[in-house]
Image (tube, rainbow, N blue to C red):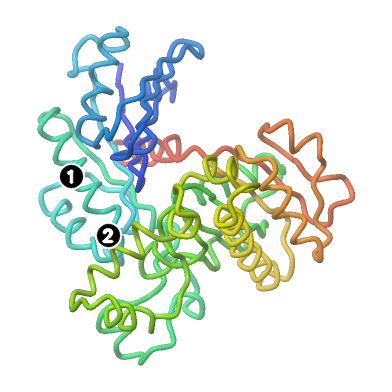
């Protein structure tokens, strides 16, 4: 029996699933939320929806991974670590180098680290996770599955920035896009739910979590995306600013009296977004709990919705309409009110939600019968998409 462990490390979370292969049976799954923050939440689900949850302050990634192994043995899901025969890691930035999943070699690990400029919050963490896992499971093959690979065929008119073209070519500057594993899964799942060929579908997929991105999908392939050269651009996120005027970087360097642009990049990546606007938290749940009494919390929610509507509306225009809008990600999958607010703002496209279906919060159609565009709620499953890619390599 083969067991493949999937590691999906985000900017503030770590999700994992242990699969029995080739049956694609999930033996256990879990998540660590609020990594390196007060009140880190460790959750493991197993054996027909049994659940174990612990709260530990400032749990870092390495300790979180060790807890996963300890609990798997404690719950007798595995007896020995040697039962795990493969480990796959989600890696955000593959640049122009990695256009499909690969086995991790020392050279691949080196290249992942070198691509950290494209995803400064993610690639270093993911490289560290690979190294940690190699120490714990030295005889187990590891694989990398890249978020950026979904966007390798992005049309040049949407991938290229309006800078001197020779710089674009020389330094490989382009819109790389992220959350590609999720957006690819959502596209495939939408085709199943709508019972339509994938290559005939036009979609706007919305992965809304601590990191958030939107993608215009044309004929089943990525056509445009909100994230860019790095995951910093696009809509407002948990701690990332999203789109801003690049002239702000030298301006802030002057006003904050620093000669180090990395300080400003740190501010834009880790201290901005929902956290920066609200002054409360990067967590939408905590912000919404205070929006009635805290003007900054209310503003953070309004800006988050506003930026999503701007991108979704522009993509619907680019695509000349769409077959469906798709909500996914931690916020998109669980925040009933926010979904309604976003769709209300897109009312000019004659898109409408069915209130009861929306409140039911279950996978499938949540639009009303008279909606000009279908709306789907699809819990994303990056882990399943990843394990299938790894299985394909192993054949």
* Residue 196 x %, y %: 70, 47
Could you say which quadrant of the image residue 82 lies in? top left
Q: Which label number is shown at residue 128? A: 1
Residue at image coords 43%, 25%: 24
Element marked by disc 2: loop
Residue 334 in the image: above or below residue 70: below
191 to the left or right of 151:
right
Total number of numbered discs in the rendering: 2
Residue at image coords 57%, 37%: 379
Residue at image coords 47%, 78%: 156
In depth, the one of 3 and 124 nearer the eye is 124
Could you say which quadrant of the image residue 264 lies in? bottom left
Residue picked out by circle 2? 120
Residue neighbourhood size for the residue with mark 2, other residues' Cα within 10 Å, grouped as few (<14), some (14–19), many (≥20):
many
The quadrant the C terminus occupies is top left
Element marked by disc 1: helix
Residue 282 in the image: above or below residue 56: below
In depth, the one of 255 and 21 nearer the eye is 255
Tell me how far mark 2 sits from mark 1, CA to CA: 13 Å
């Amino acid at each position: 029996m083969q067991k493949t462990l999937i590691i999906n490390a985000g900017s503030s979370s770590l999700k994992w699933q242990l699969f029995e292969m080739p049956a694609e049976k999930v033996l256990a799954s879990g998540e660590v939320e609020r990594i390196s923050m007060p009140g880190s939440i460790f959750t493991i689900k197993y054996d027909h929806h049994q659940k174990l949850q612990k709260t530990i302050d400032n749990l870092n990634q390495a300790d979180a991974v060790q807890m996963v192994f300890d609990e798997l043995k404690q719950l007798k899901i595995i007896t020995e670590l040697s039962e795990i025969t493969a480990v796959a890691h989600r890696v955000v930035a593959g640049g122009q180098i990695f256009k499909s999943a690969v086995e991790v070699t020392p050279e691949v690990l080196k290249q992942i680290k070198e691509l950290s400029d494209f995803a400064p919050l993610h690639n270093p963490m993911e490289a560290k996770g690979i190294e940690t896992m190699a120490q714990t499971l030295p005889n187990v093959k590891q694989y990398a599955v890249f978020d950026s690979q979904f966007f390798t065929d992005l049309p040049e008119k949407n991938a290229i920035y309006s800078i001197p073209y020779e710089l674009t070519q020389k330094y490989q500057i382009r819109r790389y896009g992220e959350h590609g594993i999720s957006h690819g899964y959502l596209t495939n799942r939408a085709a199943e739910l709508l019972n339509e060929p994938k290559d005939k579908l036009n979609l706007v997929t919305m992965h809304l979590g601590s990191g958030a991105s939107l993608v215009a999908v044309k004929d089943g392939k990525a056509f445009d995306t909100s994230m860019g050269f790095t995951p910093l651009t696009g809509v407002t996120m948990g701690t990332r600013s999203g789109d801003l005027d690049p002239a702000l970087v030298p301006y802030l360097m002057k006003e904050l009296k620093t000669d180090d642009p990395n300080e400003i990049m740190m501010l834009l990546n880790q201290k901005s977004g929902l956290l920066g606007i609200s002054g409360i938290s990067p967590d939408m749940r905590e912000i919404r709990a205070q929006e009635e009494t805290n003007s900054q919390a209310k503003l953070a929610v309004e800006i988050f919705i506003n930026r999503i509507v701007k991108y979704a509306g522009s993509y619907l225009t680019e695509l000349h309409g769409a077959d469906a809008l798709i909500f996914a990600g931690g916020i998109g999958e669980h925040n009933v009110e926010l979904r309604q607010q976003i769709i209300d703002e897109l009312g000019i496209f004659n898109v409408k939600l069915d209130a009861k279906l929306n409140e039911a919060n279950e996978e499938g159609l949540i639009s009303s019968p008279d909606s000009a565009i279908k709306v789907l709620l699809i819990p994303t499953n990056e882990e399943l998409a990843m394990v299938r890619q790894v299985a394909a390599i192993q054949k």
